[in-house]
Image (cartoon, rainbow, N blue to C red):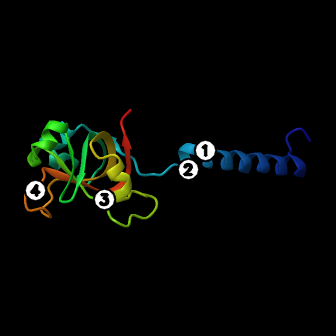
Amino acid sequence: MAGRVNGATMIRNKIFYWFFLLLTLCTPSAMADSTTYKDVSMVSLLANPQMYAGKNVRVEGFLKYQFEDTALYFGQDQADGLMLKSSLGISIPANAKPPANISGEMASAFNGRYVFVEGKFKASDQKYIESYAGSISNIVRIEPLK
């Protein structure tokens, strides 16, 4: 009988196995959104746009939120001077739905502030008459820098 496992031990082993499997699958890292956002500076995006084209990025900048000029700039001086070629257009849908929950009202609350934005980078945006150097769409997060 020394080498045999009885029925109760087998059931207990199965319960422990399923418990630890469930515990592993339900950890916060396993439950987190599988989309990751790469921290990238505006300088890197502007200097190497093709390297980040179509990628999910997290970038910091000065947000200007106005009619026909919603963009991230290096700073207020660049925003005031409308230096479009050294800025990134920001596409904020009027009717954003979860998980983004980004609205024009939220963006306007951060107007004139330094923020970070998470979204998908596009190397150039021909939607505008005078094109920005690139754009960020599919935005899932905008938060002010502290």
Question: Residue 90, position in %: x, y?
Answer: 25, 54
Residue type pointed to by label 1 = Thr
Alpha carbon of mark 4 to alpha carbon of mark 3: how far?
A: 17 Å
Residue at x-position 61% and y-position 44%: 27
Residue type pointed to by label 3 = Ile
Alpha carbon of mark 2 to alpha carbon of mark 3: how far?
A: 27 Å
Q: How crowded is mark 4: few (under 14 residues within 10 Å), some or many (20 or more)?
A: some
* Dot in front, 2 or 3: 3
Element class at badge 1? loop
Task: Please give the residue where the numbered disc 2 appears in the rendered image.
Answer: 31
Instruction: Tell me whether circle 4 and circle 2 mark residues in contact (CB < 8 Å).
Output: no
Task: Please give the residue where the numbered disc 3 appears in the rendered image.
Answer: 92
Instruction: Tell me whether circle 2 and circle 3 mark residues in contact (CB < 8 Å).
Output: no
Alpha carbon of mark 4 to alpha carbon of mark 2: how far?
A: 39 Å
Asked if residue 40 is positioned above or below residue 92 in the image, the reply reads above
* Dot in front, 1 or 4: 4
Task: Please give the residue where the numbered disc 4 appears in the rendered image.
Answer: 131
* Dot in front, 4 or 2: 4
Alpha carbon of mark 1 to alpha carbon of mark 2: how far?
A: 6 Å
Residue 6 visible at all: no
Left or right, residue 38 beside residue 47? right
Residue at x-position 48% and y-position 51%: 33
State the residue in front, 44 or 77: 77
Alpha carbon of mark 3 to alpha carbon of mark 1: how far?
A: 32 Å
Answer with mark 2 or mark 3, whichever residue precedes in sequence. Answer: 2
Name the image quarter holding the N terminus.
top right
